[in-house]
Image (cartoon, rainbow, N blue to C red):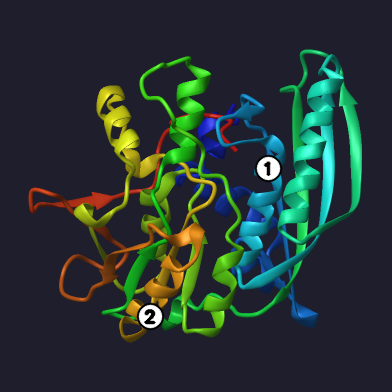
């Protein structure tokens, strides 16, 4: 008898296939069929939901509280909506220290205030000790639509941008969970992407935040969505020096490390420089970079290709195994 595996929640190919074959067909409708990070509802609003199971609960650069608010806000932003209201549901394992819970709640309060969103409803459950991962959090978010991702408008020559250095969140969780004292100062990139909202009025065609599965998985999924291949230039992908040193020691492909405060944008070629300048004018986008373009001369439709530092071409595929469970 088939059983659920960790890979079905990893953000990669198995998760996508699981959702596409076992879940979506049961609830098929035009809104769900768009498969945005948030549903575009009538009345000009967007609705998203997400669940958070990170281990450990507190990590360099954030905690499960900052993660659940920023993650929900970011899903709305990249779907074209200004976040406004959130729900908050807590599933708490018996035995969690009350001090830890209070610290998480204060973090949620602070992060919500920073993002100008209000928590307006919620739920709380407690499960017996040993039947939960200390605390799981579910959120829903509602926002007012400002724009709409238009993958159907993407064409050859359009530029692909990333808003900052990638892979920091996944690496930070990996190092602290395994007590690897390899590199000092590695912190999660967990942060809100609210500074991207004005770009919906400046010609951005598509956005997606980079979470589970990393940069490579998002690019592979984008390529499969549109009718053209993508060409990404390895030398232009922004990594921190700390991350480059750590992944070389650990033997990890940084293209598959999760982020929690970075996004990929597709923009028309003639607007790319202006949008890049706009991104770099904000603290959250100072390391923004053009990393590639939509092609019609190299590769096949549905392929995301990486031009390596040595001049070769590598096919980028969605994550196929669980690199690191419970990272968000």
Q: Are marks 2 and 1 in contact (CB under 8 Å)?
A: no
Q: Is residue 57 left or right of residue 155?
A: right
As drawn, the label of residue 66 is 1
Query: Which residue lies at the image location 23% right of the left edge and 52% below the top edge?
Result: 315
Against 72, residue 7 (above or below) is: above
* Residue 98 visible to an observer of this rendering: yes
Question: Where's residue 274, x and y in %?
Answer: 38, 80
SS of the residue under disc 1: helix
Query: Which residue lies at the image location 61% right of the left edge and 55% below the top edge?
Result: 192
Q: Could you classify mark 1 by the number of other residues whose Cα lies within 10 Å: few (under 14), some (14-19), or many (20 or more)?
A: many
SS of the residue under disc 2: helix
Question: Where's residue 57, x and y in %?
Answer: 67, 27
- Quadrant (top left/top right/bottom left/bottom right) for the C terminus: top right
Query: Which residue lies at the image location 81% right of the left edge and 38% below the top edge?
Result: 106
Task: Depth check: give the residue in front, 8 or 43.
Answer: 43
Task: Depth check: give the residue in front, 190 or 292.
Answer: 190
Q: Quadrant of residue 149?
A: bottom right
């Amino acid at each position: 008898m088939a059983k659920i595996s960790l890979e079905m929640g990893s953000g990669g190919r198995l998760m996508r296939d699981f959702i596409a074959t076992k879940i979506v067909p049961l609830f098929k409708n035009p809104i769900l069929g768009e498969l945005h990070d948030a549903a575009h509802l009538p009345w000009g609003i967007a609705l998203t939901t997400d669940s958070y199971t990170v281990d450990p609960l507190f990590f360099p650069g954030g905690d499960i509280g900052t993660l659940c608010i920023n993650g929900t806000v970011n899903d709305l932003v990249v779907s074209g909506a200004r976040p406004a209201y959130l729900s908050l549901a807590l599933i708490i394992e018996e035995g969690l220290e009350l001090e830890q819970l209070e610290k998480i709640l204060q973090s949620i309060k602070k992060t919500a205030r920073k993002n100008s969103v209000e928590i307006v409803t919620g739920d709380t459950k407690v499960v017996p000790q040993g039947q939960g991962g200390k605390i799981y959090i579910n959120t829903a978010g509602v926002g007012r639509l400002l724009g709409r991702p238009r993958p159907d408008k993407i064409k050859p020559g359009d530029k692909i941008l990333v808003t900052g250095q990638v892979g920091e969140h996944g690496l930070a969780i990996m190092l602290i969970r395994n007590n690897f004292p390899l590199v000092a100062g590695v912190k999660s990139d967990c942060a809100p992407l609210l500074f991207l909202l004005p770009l919906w009025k400046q010609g951005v065609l598509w956005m997606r935040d980079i979470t589970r599965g990393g940069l490579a998985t998002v690019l592979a999924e984008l390529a499969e969505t549109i009718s053209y291949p993508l060409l990404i230039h390895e030398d232009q992908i922004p990594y921190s020096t700390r991350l480059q040193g750590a992944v070389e020691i650990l033997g990890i492909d940084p293209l598959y490390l999760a982020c929690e405060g970075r996004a990929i944008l597709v923009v028309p070629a003639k607007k790319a420089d202006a949008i890049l300048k706009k991104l770099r004018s904000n603290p959250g986008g100072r390391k923004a970079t053009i990393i590639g373009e939509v092609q019609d001369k190299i590769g096949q439709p549905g392929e995301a290709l990486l031009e390596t530092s040595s001049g070769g071409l590598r096919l980028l595929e969605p994550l196929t195994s669980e690199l690191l469970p419970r990272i968000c």
